[in-house]
Amino acid sequence: MEFNFADSAKKMRSSAIRDLMSLAVRPDIISFAGGMPGNDLFPIDDLREIVAQLPTKRLEIAMQYGETSGMNTLIIALKNWLQQKGFPVDKNRIILTTGSLQALHILGKIFINPGDTILVENPSFVGALSAFKSFEANIVGVNIDKNGICIDDLREKLKLNPKFLYIMPNFHNPAGIIYSQQRRTELLQLMQEYNVPIFEDDAYGELFYDEETKSMLSPLKTIAKNEEQILYTGSFSKIFGPGLRLGWMLVPPEVYEKAEKCKQAIDACSSTLSQTLAEEFLTSGRMEKYIANLRNIYRQRRDCMVEELKKHMPAEVSFVEPKGGFYIWIKLPKGVNEKELLKIAIEKGVVFVIGSTFDPLGNENGYIRISFSNNTIEEIQKGIKILGESIKYLL
């Protein structure tokens, strides 16, 4: 039978990261591809304690359907947590979502008409690109540098009358950068001139590696004069576990109403069991302790990867040392093809993600993304040596 698929389905493209996951589980492959927490770092003992201490009635409720917007008790706990960080929670409402990617999917669905122009950073998070592409958006990339989105390029692209701007200011995926305070100020000043919503994706903001960096981390929604312009999304994936599939959005009431109806049509509610576990993890104080431990371990892995890159990469390779998050965005030497490099590296036992995956148009850009979050020190040392040899082979 020949199926007559929707135009939007015909335009969907496969994620290179998803395609590489089959390689990532091979025992002979060192994977720098997935942006995943280390399996060995999950708070399993905390999880066992939480489940063991939950009364039967709570577990019964946790196994049942819940409200579309989320469990009220978790919303209150999350609201208190965000308020301590300076978020305007009294002027906005929270919706708990099935991962922060669902939040982006919902926001895309309620804003995008087929053919609408939207602005994203170039490079940009592939999950967001896929979500927005599924609604047949005209995706236009805005260049970024080590300090954040390039203001002159953004000013020019705003002339296209975009529906929204999607950005990831803290520990960008894939570029690993953090927006400077000056760039944040310039961005907000420019955007005040336009009636264009900003989607602020902050999946990695808690994973800073030093106190100096922490002082740079003010989410845009906490510092903007017209904060209602900013639709903020966060996630438990990097600070508890991605298997919970639990994220959230903090949005103005008028956006909340549309988003709640949209979510109701998608999945009725996010996992009540996951929400129950997240509430206990957050309110018991376990989450803050866990995040502090993650920062130490990820910093060690970051330090190791940076040291190995300096040791084994040819001089023509360049990168920005990340101050948090999971990723290093490597600019390859001129003439080294990212796809050819991936093929050679896989043959030698290493996998990563090619830069074109994160380009809004899928164009090759001479970059690769490597992650240090899910690897031991020994794997990083061995894998980066192989990667350096593979690049030198192509020079």
Image: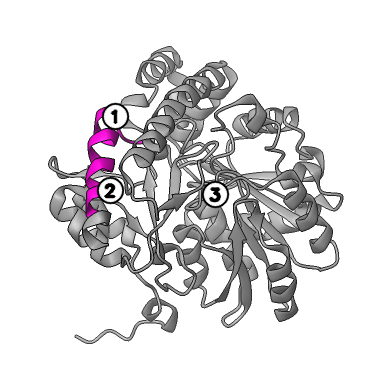
Residue at 39%, 77% in the rendered image: 9
Report the amino acid beneath label 2: Gly
The answer to whether marks 3 and 1 mark residues whose Cβ atoms lie closer than 8 Å is: no
Along the polypeptide, which appears first: circle 2 or circle 1? 1
Region of the chain picked out in magenta, as a range: 374-390
Tell me how far mark 3 sits from mark 1, CA to CA: 22 Å
Q: Quadrant of residue 230?
A: bottom right
Quadrant into which the C terminus falls: bottom left
The answer to whether marks 3 and 2 mark residues whose Cβ atoms lie closer than 8 Å is: no
The residue closer to the viewer here, 176 or 310, is: 310
Residue at 81%, 48% in the rendered image: 224
Is most of the magenta stretch helix, strand or loop? helix
Report the amino acid beneath label 3: His
Residue at 62%, 56% in the rendered image: 167
Does the magenta segment cover residue 375? yes
**Where is mark 1, residue-wise?**
376
Q: Is residue 345 left or right of residue 170?
A: left
- Tell me where residue 81 appears, x and y as whole percent: 67, 28
**Where is mark 3, residue-wise?**
172
Q: Secondary structure at mark 2?
A: helix
Residue at 31%, 67% in the rendered image: 337
* Pointer 1 local density, CA inside 10 Å: few below 14, some 14–19, many at least 20: some
